[in-house]
Image: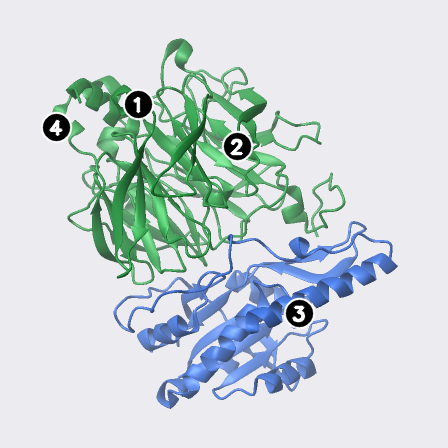
Amino acid sequence: MRATAALVAAATLVAALAGAAAAADRPALRPEDVSYTYGAAPFAPAFTPPPPGSYELPPIDTVADHAVLDADGTETTLAAVIGDRLAVVSFIYGSCAEAAGCPVSTAALHRLDRLLAADPALAREVRLVTVSFDPARDTPARMAAMRARHAPRSDWRFVTTRDAAMLQPLLDDFGQGISELRYPDGTPTGVFRHVLKVFLLDRRRRVRNVYSVGFLHPELVLNDLRTVR
Amino acid sequence: MRPIALAALLVFLAASSVPADETCMSPYMPKLTGQEDYVYVWTLGVDGLGDGSDKLVTVGANPAAPDYGKVVSSTSVGGRHEAHHGGFTEDRRHLWLAGIDDGAIFVFDVAADPAKPKLVKTITTFEKDSKLAGPHGFYALPGRMLVPGLSNATHRDGRTGLAEYNNDGEYIRTVWMPNDAPYGYDARVQPRLNRMLTSSFTGWKNYMRPLGELMADPEAMKQFGNTMVVWDYHARRPLQILTVPGAPLEIRWALQPRHDYAFTAAALTAKLWLIEAQPDGTFAASAVADVGDPQKTPLPVDISLSADDRYLFVATFMDGTARVFDVSDPHRPRVVHEQQIGRQVNMISQTWDGERVYFTSSLLSNWDKTGDDDEQFLKAYRWDGATLTRLFALDFTAEKLGRPHHMHFGQKRFYANQLASVAVSDGGGS
């Protein structure tokens, strides 16, 4: 259902952008302009994740603290948002309709939120954090609305930044590259090309896993949380 | 098989290739669709030819551009390291390239100017970090690089493992191959099944020795792998050891949904093998076709599977030939085209749409043919489903470049983030 919704959203976005492009005498944005190709078919996991604790997740990297705005517009830091918890940090932008992009990531976190709610002891140790990389459009109010739509049952925070200057060090530190798709005259389309990434952080802000397309399996993330708790 | 023929097979078998083609890259990495602008060729330096150093050569590949089929740029890394294979990071912005002699790893930024990749980092601690030797390939994982080794730093024989680095070039861990299947070569993940396959070759002591010397050492000739390993990828835990005689090299997972299988080619025995999931979730290996006449030791060294899982291209080094198998029925591959590419051929790279196929010639510096047979080239062909038609050829000896080995594709539009419907001629970024 969610995959269908994402496709519909993508088609809607492309249609809207195509209309805007035509009005401005610009080439139409096509689906292949928006989405990366990762494989011949969407990722559809057909396995049972290995049991928690049956494997190791050695630290991949350590991230520093960075300023962000929480959903009520208060300036804080990512470390303060996470607190003394494990964290699953997802980078998205609210206008994204890429079939293998933010909708996939957000749907996975939604599912993870429900899984965590079913394990209250673990849920008390975990904070989900959705970070926007589109500060111009994803205002704190929009992030708050996004959070309301998902009606989290675990502790799921939505944060953004004030501007590119606040955002860029955060993206650089996590290695979350983004670039805005532009019309040939250089005008931004409002669409970002980006590799979907979700990060699992332990309490020392060490990255213990990174999930992307072809790997973002909520049950697997849950087992990873149980492994590093 | 006569001992000499076997020895020759074993020797030539070693050079091989890790996939560079667009259909066989990490499933965690975005693919290039549409017309490629560049082919990046990791090239072994040759003493007395040009500057003699290993280098990354960028060749124009867009027929609409004036640099089509020509050298666009060339960046030497200094010295000869036995340049072999490479791979992009998961965001495709950096290209990691390795030498399998000293284990040096060179990281190029390809995003800033796709026409002229820039060397931005050199990692000289691979052996110290991982205890492995011979970093054979780079397979992008989210935030990391998986680096299958060929050997180890202590004994430099065939016992090896899989190293992991983060995208900043910092070492994470080494996972050793199981004791009963110690050799390594290729490593490929099917994320849908959470399964990784690894294949097996030989160690530094063998692949760096001159051919004649190696062939005269019967003990050394026994030190080649005959196994593949099925892993729980997420746990990095070996689950099964499959017997695949004759040094299984390149691994290609099928790409279509519900195609739960992979192919490999055993170089010594010149056979295609199907590695297929069974109803109980285990895997079984079966030989499904000969590649040419195995008695003539053709040495299949690289394979490439089309994105629709229909065609499997196989390059055989000894006869310099490309064979195209229809593998629509993976249990019954059949040859639908056969064409000599040169006097020797090694690597194959096909585009995502399967319409263009590129070949290079070099296997290993000490194992390439000699004299007039030592052709060193990049050749581009169009594949129309029936035949290969030459598009261009670039003579790497005449250009004083060296021995071309691994290939990767570059595209200005991919990095410029502009719309495909308008020609992008300046590579300007967003």
> Which residue occupies 57% across, 84% down?
A150
Where does label 3 land, which residue?
Answer: A9
Do the residues at discs 3 and 4 belong to one chain?
A: no
Q: How is the image coloured?
A: by chain
Where does label 1 land, which residue?
Answer: B293
Q: Chain of mark 4?
A: B
Pick whichever of labels 4 and 1 is earlier in the sequence: 4
Where does label 2 land, which residue?
Answer: B357
Q: Are marks 3 and 1 in contact (CB under 8 Å)?
A: no
Quarter of the rendering occupied by the N terminus of chain B: top left
Res B325 seen here? yes
Q: Chain of mark 3?
A: A
Q: Which is more foreground, mark 4 or mark 1?
A: 1
Drawing shade for chain A: blue
> Which residue occupies 55% across, 59% down?
A195
| Residue A163 percent coordinates (x, y) | 69, 70
Q: Is residue B264 left or right of residue B323?
A: left
Res A84 seen here? no
Q: Residues within 10 Å of mark 3 (few under 14, many from 20)?
A: some
Q: Is residue A148 left or right of residue B138?
A: right
Where does label 4 land, which residue?
Answer: B219
Q: Residues within 10 Å of mark 4 (few under 14, many from 20)?
A: few
| Residue B362 percent coordinates (x, y) | 41, 25
Q: CA distance from mark 3 to mark 4?
A: 63 Å
Amino acid carrying label 2: it is: Val
Q: Looking at the image, how many numbered discs can be counted on the residues? A: 4
Q: Which is more foreground, mark 3 or mark 4?
A: 3
Q: Which is more foreground, mark 2 or mark 4?
A: 2
Amino acid carrying label 3: it is: Ala
